[in-house]
Amino acid sequence: MKKGFIFDLDGVIVDTAKYHYLAWKKLANELGFEFTEEQNELFKGVSRKRCLEILLDIGAVEATQYQFENWMVEKNEDYLEYIKKMDETEILPDVKKVLSFLKKNKIPIALGSASKNAQPILEKVGLLSYFDVIVDGNNVTKAKPDPEVFILAAGKLGVSSEDCVVFEDAVAGIEAANRANMTSIGIGNENILSEANYNFEDFTQMDINFIKELAGIS
């Protein structure tokens, strides 16, 4: 049976969460309040629009539609300045080993991310060629935990949802994968990602035999 592998981007392939945090923190400070790393946990796997809504709630700031749209653009421009400096050293440990193994064995690989900057980030870190399909924030209308991003990715890979494996670091992403009837792999704290079918702190803990089993390679 043909299998498909779908990877989230932030916190799974690269750690761009730190750059999102710095950009949101800068905006919060401009608006007159502090934004902590703990509060930033609320933003994992969430769309930019929803993140700004949460940020404004934290700061008790009201915004016109014009201000809201301007602040979204401003935050993204600050974030893009950070990711311009990214290179392959930003790839999280052993991610490339897993991608190389899947590619070598001709297993279809997709990206399924809320990020609207997924393609330039993959280009910057030299991983774009590993992906057969990219579905990101430019292609979807519903944010995780809605399964739209993963269902679209499976369709583009030509693989049924039940035969897809998803790597995610966010609760919303795990829920989306489960709702799509896909095998969910939590990357990070297993207590937080307890709804995942399997849990690993990172890819260094993942044996290639485990990947073989998931991919149906004998």
Image (cartoon, rainbow, N blue to C red):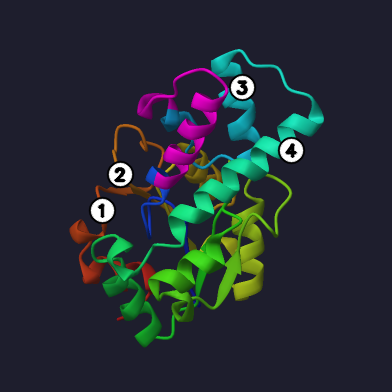
Disc with the residue nearer the chain's start (1 vs 3): 3
Please name the amino acid that badge 2 sits on. Gly
Considering the numbered disc 1 on the image, is that residue within a helix, a strand or a loop?
Answer: loop
Q: Nearer the viewer, residue 170 or 40?
A: 40
Please name the amino acid that badge 1 sits on. Asp
Residue 138's place in the image compared with 212, above or below, is: above
- Residue drawn at x 29%, y 60% is 92
Instruction: Read off the residue under disc 2.
Output: 188
Disc with the residue nearer the chain's start (2 vs 4): 4
- Residue drawn at x 51%, y 49% is 79
Considering the numbered disc 4 on the image, is that residue within a helix, a strand or a loop?
Answer: helix
> Which of the two marks, 2 or 4, is nearer to us in this view?
4
State yes or no: residue 105 in magenta: no
The crowd level at tag 4 (other Cα within 10 Å; few <14, some 14-19, many 20+) is few
In the picture, the disc for residue 56 is: 3
Looking at this rendering, what residue extends furthest in the right direction? 65
Residue 182 visible in the current orientation: no
Spatial CA distance of label 1 from label 3 is 32 Å
Q: Are marks 2 and 1 in contact (CB under 8 Å)?
A: yes
* Stretch in magenta: 19-39
Instruction: Read off the residue under disc 1.
Output: 202
In the picture, the disc for residue 69 is: 4
- Residue drawn at x 38%, y 60% is 13
**Would you identify the image quadrant in which residue 31 lies?**
top right
Please name the amino acid that badge 3 sits on. Leu
**Would you identify the image quadrant in which residue 183 lies?**
bottom left
The crowd level at tag 2 (other Cα within 10 Å; few <14, some 14-19, many 20+) is some
Magenta stretch: helix, strand or loop mostly: helix
Please name the amino acid that badge 4 sits on. Glu
